[in-house]
Amino acid sequence: MRRIAGRTRAAGQHAAPPTPERTDMARIGLVGFFGWGNYGDELFLENWRATIGLHHEVEVVHDMLSQPYFSRPAVEVVKDFDALVIGGGDLVIPNKISPLYWNRAWLAKPIYISGVGVPTWIKHQAPDVMERLRNFFQHENVRHIGVRDQESAHWVRRELAPKVPVEAHADLAFNLLLPPAVKFDRPTIGINLRSHRAGSDPAALVKVCQTYADRGYDVVNIVLGTGRTRTTDLEVARAFPFDRQVILESEDTAELSSYLGGLDVLVSNKFHGTVVATMYGVSSVVLSSTTKSRNLYRRLSREHLLSTNEDPDMLRKVELAAAPVSSAAVRQLEVEANAAVRTLVGKLNADFRPSYKAASGS
């Protein structure tokens, strides 16, 4: 299997933007699951750097990848920033709370919540957690709330009753400019695995891989992670019992995205693997049918491609994935995500850039 070299990055993506030469920039702290190498979260970080970072100084708030996450007290950390942006991912969890995301210390500064989701399949609500979340979301310093789908928006409005409007939009990864897709020499089916599902019976997925290999497809196992996540997911990929697979890995999320774009079909354990494949027009069968996957595929009218790791009907669903993704539906998601990011950046500019406020008449 050959990859075509000379791929270029999309402008402004996958690297911190140059520091703007202005004196009216705010210092924006980014709160999220950044640095562990989970593919989707690193896409969010790149999104913030390429958008908010064009107007303000941005920096990830935490400096440690294990609790307590900060080498200084959080009340001291927050003093370094003018405002905080919290998101994205499934950060609003009703039965546990992270001191990284919903730390009371953050409420000393203006808060902009954007791109978060709620795993509504979790039915147990811990009273102390819900009280903490309500107090946070209802605080006067929360200036903006944007969530990933209507289901999450309904939950936040009903359960947390914030004082500012809750805006629903597509996953913000749909705002990204993706690199050109890799071109493979032969038809190629891609799979990706993840460590916390490594104990499931691989027989159904092996059957898919064997069937497509026999049909002349190359089978690539894409390790969708960098850093720590790459290390653990690579072990799972190597242990997958199909000896005709080719493992593709990288510390560059742009390269991982380009692999997804070159596929003919994807069988994915990772939500943002499906999201990015969909943006390239590549059909994806979803093995991790979480709330976010179901909500996305409902919008795309592709619920029939929701599966599980041990689904005996997996092969048939992969064959059904030959039907193309609706480009119009994908475009609508991209438009929503772009509008949501522009709204967030506009609010930050209106609040923290006097020159922007004067020019806009705010």
Image (spheres, rainbow, N blue to C red):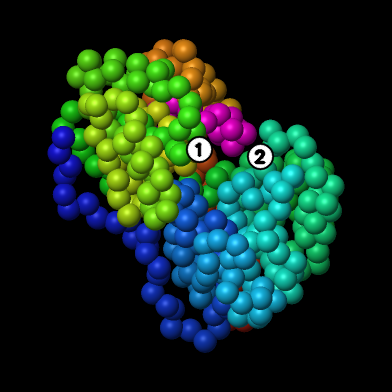
Asked whether, in this view, residue 161 is left or right of residue 277, the answer is right
> Can the viewer see residue 359?
no
> At numbered mark 1, what does the secondary structure look like: helix, strand or loop?
helix
Residue at the image point whose x is 50% and y is 38% from the top: 196
Picture disc at residue 312:
none
Q: 124 and 117: which one is in front?
A: 124
How many numbered discs, if any?
2
The quadrant of the image that shows the N terminus is top left
Residue 135 is situated, as x and y percent measured from the top left of the image, at 82, 59
Image: 71 above or below 266: below
Distance in Å between CA atoms under marks 2 and 1: 17 Å
> Can the viewer see residue 69?
yes
Disc 1 packing (10 Å; few <14; some 14–19; many ≥20): few
Asked whether, in this view, residue 127 is left or right of residue 300, the answer is right
Disc 2 packing (10 Å; few <14; some 14–19; many ≥20): some
Which amino acid type is shown beneath numbered disc 1? Answer: His
> At numbered mark 2, what does the secondary structure look like: helix, strand or loop?
loop
Residue 46 is situated, as x and y percent measured from the top left of the image, at 44, 59
Q: 218 and 343: which one is in front?
A: 218
Which amino acid type is shown beneath numbered disc 2? Answer: Pro
Residue marked by disc 1: 196
Residue marked by disc 2: 119
The quadrant of the image that shows the C terminus is bottom right
Image: 16 above or below 288: below
Residues in magenta, as a range: 281-297
Disc with the residue nearer the chain's start (2 vs 1) = 2
